[in-house]
Amino acid sequence: MQTPQIEQTAGREIQSLYETDFLAWTQQQANFLRDRQWSQLDLSNLIEEIESLGRQQRAELRNRLSVLIGHLLKWEYQPGRRSRSWLNTIRIQRLDTLELIEENPSLKLYLQEVQEKAYIKGIILASGETNLPIKTFPQDCPYMLEDILSDRFYPGEPATDDLME
């Protein structure tokens, strides 16, 4: 059994490793877990990192939807500038978003909330890339979530055959 002084020193070393070499800290914590060395775990930082992973998944969902919505807005509001690049971005963001939700089903609970935030960023993206004023776009998202994620939905006029092939 370790004395309190040794435990304090070990705690400082773990904290120092967390602050100076995050990768080494993660490997060390994984080894402690595998070896069931519960007293060696840096619990406060482990808890923080696990919570952070959940926030990262929500942020990734929000970012993917932002790019997707931004491209749907560009698609609708600048039909003359549609390109394979826009089409591919829409397709890939849809696939990646659906895959993220499939891998993290509880993200479905946040879709509505995330859509509202993603729409604001999508407007900024679309405005910046089209040079259209922000006020050009509706204040509220004009697309339903089901449409945003549907591989059959392209707002405005349908794409020309040469882009869709």
Image (spheres, grey):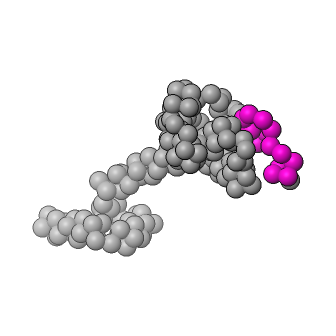
In the rendered image, residue 9, in percent from the top left (x then y), is placed at 17, 69
Please report the residue visible at 87 percent of the width from the left and 48 percent of the height from the top. Answer: 161
82 vs 155: above or below: below
The magenta span reads 149-164
| Residue 22 forms part of the magenta stretch | no
Q: Nearer the viewer, residue 164 or 36?
A: 164
Please report the residue visible at 37 percent of the width from the left and 73 percent of the height from the top. Answer: 24
In the rendered image, residue 82, in percent from the top left (x then y), is placed at 72, 48
Q: Is residue 31 visible?
A: yes
Q: Quadrant of residue 107?
A: top right
| Residue 152 forms part of the magenta stretch | yes
Q: Is residue 62 visible?
A: no
Q: Which of 64 and 127 is in front in this view?
A: 127
Q: Is residue 8 left or right of residue 135?
A: left
Q: Quadrant of residue 14?
A: bottom left
In the rendered image, residue 74, in percent from the top left (x then y), is placed at 64, 42
Q: In which quarter of the image is residue 70?
A: top right
